[in-house]
């Protein structure tokens, strides 16, 4: 399933796998609050990934953050 969120004034697609047991809206709330927290207080490598974010893939309790550079792709725990 694909949904869109707004992060840093741009639309970012979020892809869900069928193995997610949490309600979609709850996962999106946790995701957006985590991303906002990390962009403000995260380390440099994470901020670099978030600044060039192109899509997010939710697998279980992790968010895989895909950026323009394949080297900047990160996994972020949501729970």
Image (tube, rainbow, N blue to C red):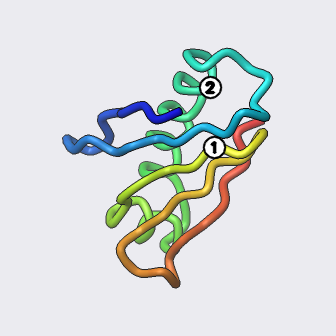
2 or 1: mark nearer the eye: 1
Q: Which residue does the image show at 35% across and 74% down from the upper left?
A: 68
Q: Which residue does the image show at 42% across and 54% down from the upper left?
A: 55
Q: Up-down: is 5 above or below 74?
A: above
Q: Is residue 11 left or right of residue 36?
A: left
Quarter of the view holding residue 18:
top right
Q: Which residue does the image show at 40% across and 81% down from the upper left?
A: 69
Q: Is residue 13 left or right of residue 14?
A: left
Residue that badge 2 annotates: 27
Find the distance from the CA under tag 2 to the CA under tag 1. Answer: 9 Å
> For the residue carrying disc 2, how many other residues have a C-alpha within 10 Å: few (<14), some (14-19), or many (20+)?
some
> For the residue carrying disc 1, how many other residues have a C-alpha within 10 Å: few (<14), some (14-19), or many (20+)?
many
Q: Secondary structure at mark 2?
A: helix
Residue that badge 1 annotates: 58
Query: Whole-percent x and y of residue 27?
Result: 62, 25
Image mark count: 2
Q: Up-down: is 70 above or below 44?
A: below
Quarter of the view holding residue 13:
top left
For the C terminus, give its image quadrant. Answer: top right
Q: Which residue does the image show at 43% across and 51% down from the upper left?
A: 39
Query: Whole-percent x and y of residue 66?
Result: 48, 64
Q: Secondary structure at mark 1?
A: strand
Q: Could you say which disc has been placed on residue 13 in the image?
A: none
Query: Whole-percent x and y of residue 65?
Result: 53, 58
Residue placed most toward the observer, 42 or 32: 32
Query: Whole-percent x and y of residue 58?
Result: 63, 43
Residue placed most toward the observer, 47 or 57: 57
Contact (CB < 8 A) between labels 2 and 1? Answer: yes
Precedes in sequence: disc 2 or disc 1: 2
Q: Is residue 35 left or right of residue 48?
A: right
């Amino acid at each position: 399933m694909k949904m869109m969120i707004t992060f840093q004034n741009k639309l970012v697609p979020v892809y869900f796998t069928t193995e997610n047991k949490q309600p979609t809206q709850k996962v999106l709330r946790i995701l957006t609050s985590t991303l906002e927290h990390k962009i403000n207080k995260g380390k440099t490598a994470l901020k670099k990934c978030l600044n060039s974010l192109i899509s997010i893939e939710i697998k279980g309790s992790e968010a895989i953050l895909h950026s323009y550079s394949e080297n900047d792709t990160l996994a972020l725990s949501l729970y």
